[in-house]
Amino acid sequence: MTMVSTPLAERLRPRTLDDYIGQDKLLGPKGSLRRAIMQNAIPSMILWGPPGVGKTTLALLLADVTKRQFHNLSAISSGVKDLREILSRPSGLFPPILFIDEIHRYNKSQQDALLGAVEKGQVTLIGATTENPSFEINSALLSRCQVYILEAFGQDELKEIIDRALVKDSWLAGKNITFNSYDALFRLSGGDGRKLLNLLELVVLAKGDVSEIEITDEWVTEVAQQNIARYDKSGEQHYDIISAFIKSLRGSDPNGAVYWMARMIVAGEDPSFIARRMLIMASEDIGNANPTAMIMANACMQAVNVIGYPECRIILSQVAVYLATSPKSNASYMAIGEAIELAKNTAHLPVPLHLRNAPTKLMKQIGYGKDYKYAHSYEGNFARQEFLPEELSGTRLFEPGSNAREEEIRKKLQYWWGDHYKY
């Protein structure tokens, strides 16, 4: 049977809620979103999750199940004019669903244009995003929406997607397909259902016009390498490219960093996304080895939001080279990680009396704040005393890195604390 031109992932898009795979916490029998759907009382919402987990499909299903009008916009190609045109249309008994894909790409004025309509119930907004809504969605709009987190597919769910494809797709069902292993398909799809189905289609096509097909990890890997798509900011290689970029910065290779950045720029990646990831990297991987790195990265993030493409590419490049060639330390990153784990297991320990606040006479009488040494009253603005619960005395969470600045920090700590913390 000849394959149809529509991609496999589109041919298999679920048409009913029962066909929808995954997201049991939301759509299972006791899922909060399923209950809202059954009552036809769906709220405005933000669907947050990685590519290929069914955000668009879920929006379409919500409109179908609740029998509402459905309007679809992409934040990449639409603006305030498009929003106003949709909002001016008459609606039925229930407010129409307005689905905005990649809503994080709307700027403040575009997001503000939605506020009134959402607040008045003129539309039910469903925004889809791969980015953290806390960073990308205006607080005023976010407060009017329920945020639902969609998770990447697990192996069982990816296997279910494949099994369904073999049965429900007429082109695949006409072949006898066996799997020596699913490992490569699962690994290369990375929990992305759309990517999994598109890869499966490529692998079967590559076998030619035969009816008996055995799929092996080796064959999947070979086909995938031959058909690696260029970077797509909304899908295939988004996370692989940004990973390569950050690892180049961390690995002190300005050439690799600028190359992977250029790949993102050519594909039209949001410059604020690149800048924000550099700001995180500046703290996580450079830290106090060069504190100016975070200042540079923060200034870069502010500048790209003001300037935009194409000029901001110069600022992005300058800061990327600066970060790549800075000394590296993850000491602060490791310290907070260890501290959080320690805090989880020791949350029962009381704050030592001398460190407690004593705003009342009674608190002072029972010892709050007693024997606390005010650092500025001592020579060098330092007085040795215990700042941890007694049970954790001597615990060291921060280990200075092997670089010039943190070696200076190590010397200061050794001078202040001596053998107490064994720096």
Image (tube, grey):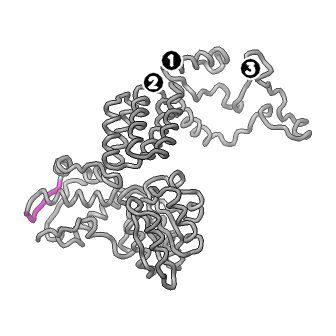
Q: Which residue is mark 1?
A: 404
User: Which comes before the other along the chain, label 1 or label 2?
Assistant: 2
User: Which comes before the other along the chain, label 3 or label 1?
Assistant: 3
In the rendered view, tell whether residue 213 sits above or below residue 119: above
Residue shown at 86% from the left, 40% from the top: 359
Q: CA distance from mark 1 to mark 2?
A: 9 Å
Q: Are marks 1 and 2 in contact (CB under 8 Å)?
A: yes
Q: Which residue is mark 2?
A: 327
Residue shown at 44% from the left, 25% from the top: 326
Residue 34, how many percent across, how many down? 49, 73
Q: Which residues are magenta?
A: 209-215
- Callout 2: few (<14), some (14-19), or many (20+) C-alpha neighbours within 10 Å? many
User: Which comes before the other along the chain, label 3 or label 2?
Assistant: 2
- Callout 3: few (<14), some (14-19), or many (20+) C-alpha neighbours within 10 Å? few
Residue 315, how many percent across, how many down? 43, 36
In the image, which disc is placed on residue 381?
3
Q: Amino acid at mark 2?
A: Pro
Secondary structure state at the residue bearing disc 2 = loop
Q: Nearer the viewer, residue 317 or 171?
A: 317
Secondary structure state at the residue bearing disc 1 = helix
